Amino acid sequence: MAILEIKDVTSGYGEVQILWGANLDIEDGRLTSLVGANGAGKTTLMRTIMGSIKPWQGSVIFQGQDISSLPAHAKAEMGVVLVPEGRQLFTDMSVEENLEMGASPKRARANVKQNLEFVYEMFPRLKERRAQKSGTMSGGEQQMLAVARGIMAEPVVLMIDELSLGLAPVLVLDLFQSLIRLKNAGLTMILVEQNVQMALAVSDYGYVLAQGQVEIAGPSQDLAENEHVRSAYLGH
Amino acid sequence: MDFLFTSILDGLMLGFVYGLAAMGLTLIWGVMNVINLSHGPIISLGMFGVYLLFTFLGMNPYIALIFVALFGLLLGIVIYFVAVNRVIDAPHLSTLLATFAVAMIITGLGTAVFTASPRNVDYSLGSVTIGNATIPVTRIVAAVLSVLITAGLYLYLHRTRSGRYIRAVANNRSAAELMGVPSVRILALSFGIGTMLAALAGGLISTLFPFTILAGGTYELKSFVIGVLGGLGNPIGALFGGLILGVLEGIIPTFMPATWVPVLEFGLFVLILLVRPQGLFGAKKS
Ligand SMILES: Nc1ncnc2c1ncn2[C@@H]1O[C@H](COP(=O)(O)OP(=O)(O)OP(=O)(O)O)[C@@H](O)[C@H]1O
Ligand SMILES: [Mg+2]
């Protein structure tokens, strides 16, 4: 069953329409990847699902409930959690305070201790730097923190907008490994990625977004073998 | 040398109160990048709050402060929702005008009700002599309370959940919203705390000097100088800025006419803006 349904969603900025009727079904417990060219509207779609920008038309259904018009904080409270593009850390706060901020939703408050241990074990670097101001960390460390902060919210659906952008290959591998761990633990995730090959390799299902609409959808393996996807996004 | 010692001591005492007066202004700026032009009139309301409770109900001025603080908090939340919230994302000029309108309303109503004649809280705790300096005890109490309130603010911002939310919203509002923080409520609360601090400062000042309903304006101007000294957006820096200003005000009149005080203060203001715009004690970048 789809835990999150995006139905004919349109949205944009001011007068400029970016999404032209996007349809996605996010299945429970699966890792779904969302790929597409720069400017295709992936980030806009994430923001629209989250409620940072309001959908113009269409609906966002979460666990059978229409949440289209809820503000972002209410969705986070329900377990729809976004690791935003560009990380958006609390740069003046320490690593640990950022993680505590991640655990703000009421549903996440009971298990802060265990969750902290879990993310510290997943990203030992963060533990070493727990007292450091997050704004002074390296790009890779900041990315780990952004993901860890998302996990602290005990998400029902975790959406990650750009996991690997600008990171060294070793670190990309690390982060993808963490992702697989989360997936094996049963977490439902949406992954927006520039690294299409990696994204399709780890995900169960994939969507290709083009000009604000879903261009192709299917099991990730099929997408990876699809002629059009190969020539347009995989470069062979 | 004795008179210099007296002036410095005097200035330091006042400086703590000045710092408290500036703290609310700088907190609001730090959290939401709004320059609250109703800051001065709210300081005046704090003065009148203590004055009225003391004069007509015979309440101890320091007990009256508690009511003044609550009033300041609620008033700030109301002002936020009525005047600030709808223009919070608009350019600075809009929030400046909105809070200026609030200032005009408070000052207009205040003048109509209380007239512009001077009042004072006729309350004394005697004085103490340190060396050759004689200091009214009310000044010492005001200074101590200012330090305690500052410490309380620091602990609140750093040790409580809602305090942490305030810092998070100040740092990155949209990210805080993504973490489940209802940012509008937090902004309203921050504005309320900012005006509460202004009202408290006014209440304390009323135990030290005579005042009119317009007196808050002077402290608002000082608050800008202090804010720039301590780093706008840094409430704790405000305390140090206040101390510097207080000491300057104590020392300057000992070797030149007191009318030079504002000239030097604002000269300093411009100088700091030119050479060290982030304030002497650093500040958050916005
Ligand atoms: N805040 C904004 N205001 C106006 N236009 C915007 C804004 N953010 C994005 N856009 C525009 O919306 C379109 C889609 O952008 P979006 O960020 O959703 O693309 P994307 O698929 O995430 O791209 P990328 O892979 O580069 O991250 C782009 O043309 C972009 O210029
Ligand atoms: Mg994007």
Image: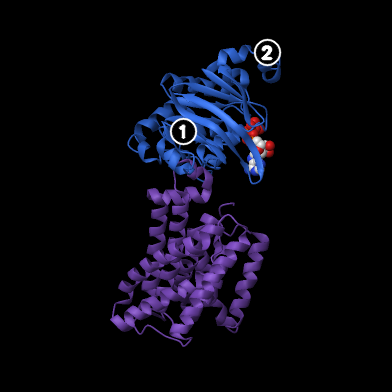
Chain colours: A blue, B purple
Q: Which mark is residue A179?
A: none
Q: Splitting the image into 4 quarters, where does residue A67 fall?
A: top left
Q: Kindly indicate whether the residues beneath marks 2 and 1 are on one polypeptide chain.
A: yes
Residue at the image point whose x is 37% and y is 80% from the top = B51
Q: From the viewer's perspective, is residue A210 above or below residue B200?
A: above
Q: Is mark 2 within 8 Å of ligand 1?
A: no
Q: Nearer the viewer, mark 2 or mark 1?
A: 1
Q: Nearer the viewer, residue B32 or B19?
A: B32
Q: Secondary structure at mark 2?
A: helix
Q: Chain of mark 2?
A: A
Quadrant of the snapshot with the N terminus of chain A: top left
Q: Secondary structure at mark 1?
A: strand
Crowd class of label 2 (few under 14; some 14 to 19; many from 20; radius 10 Å) = few
Residue A235, given in percent of the width and then of the height, sits at 71, 17
Crowd class of label 1 (few under 14; some 14 to 19; many from 20; radius 10 Å) = some
Residue B176, given in percent of the width and then of the height, sits at 48, 44
Q: Is mark 1 within 8 Å of ligand 1?
A: no
How many marks on residues?
2
* Residue position marked by numbered label 2 in the rendering: A227
Left or right for B58, reference A140: left
Q: Amino acid at mark 1?
A: Ile
* Residue position marked by numbered label 1 in the rendering: A61
Q: Taking the image as four quarters, which one is ligand 1 found in? A: top right
Q: From the viewer's perspective, is residue A204 above or below residue A165?
A: above
Residue B26, given in percent of the width and then of the height, sits at 52, 61
Residue at the image point whose x is 33% and y is 76% from the top = B61
Residue B84, given in percent of the width and then of the height, sits at 52, 61
Left or right for B144, reference A42: left
